[in-house]
Image: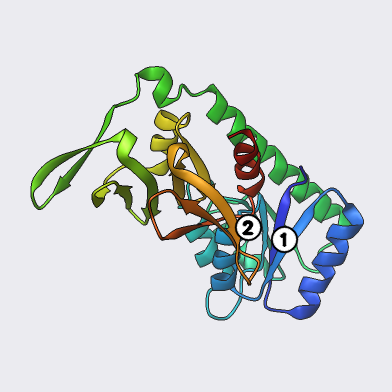
Amino acid sequence: MKPRVIICDDERLARERLVRLLEDIGGYELVGLAEHGEQALRLVAEYEPDIVLMDMRMPVMDGLSCARQLAQRESPPAIIFCTAFDEHALEAFSVPAAGYVLKPVSRESLREALARACRVNQLQLENLRQQPTRSERTSSRSHITARTHRGIELIPIDEVRYFLADHKYVTVRHEHGEVLIDETLKELEEEFGDRFIRIHRNALLSLTYLEGLEVVATGQYRVRIRGLDERLVVSRRHLPELRETLHRV
């Protein structure tokens, strides 16, 4: 699969130049264009790219602010800063950045920065593979523990429909309602990965209650959940794996 790229720059000509260079270099898939940091955050949430080519000075939200927010993601994309302003170079490296290229961006400098970003991502993947998972360290739990106004509740994992992340907490939707827990989706996926499937960066769905897949008028895919009227959005990144899972059921 080709590395997925988003370009974020408030100048149309700069965006068009990066698009041409990306096509000329080859081997990368452009999945979105943004004019400022807030648009970039929305595109990253939707497309989950591997790399973001980021300008620094932009209206609404600048590149550095955007990069700092992206760094908080569970699986952040590699950031390559593209700018005409030399004085930002040192500040750029105060946030996790895979590269830095000066405008006007040349094909060779962009090629090298992209290759370096891919190596960074590959190293992150290798480090994750070498770490023992929670399921390897201990057997998975039969219940989820949640603190509520009634005290401590034990929710059988067999009754959990899905886990949905929102900032610091995760919502557990179960047979009798929902509760909040102070755990991460990454930890839950490691522990219960054989029983739940990732359908979005912020959602794990129980395979037991996976009923089907539908597409709405906007082209967005959503899953049907057995016993519930609500639907959960499926990201494009996780759609192929979900389809494969449905074919095996």
Picture residue at 23% right of the left edge, 49% below the top: 176
Where is mark 2, residue-wise?
Answer: 47
Q: Is residue 65 left or right of residue 163?
A: right
Picture residue at 75% right of the left edge, 63% below the top: 102
Q: Visible in this render: residue 71?
A: no
- In depth, the one of 248 and 74 nearer the eye is 248
Which image quarter is the C terminus in? top right
Q: Residues within 10 Å of mark 2 (few under 14, many from 20)?
A: some
Height in image: 178 above or below 82? above
Colouring style: rainbow
Picture residue at 80% right of the left edge, 51% below the top: 28
The picture places residue 10, in percent across and down from the top left corner, at 67, 78
**In terms of secondary structure, where does tag 1 sit?**
strand
Per the rendering, the mark at residue 132 is: none
Height in image: 94 above or below 210? below
The picture places residue 79, in percent across and down from the top left corner, at 63, 54
The picture places residue 99, in percent across and down from the top left corner, at 68, 51
Which image quarter is the N terminus in? top right
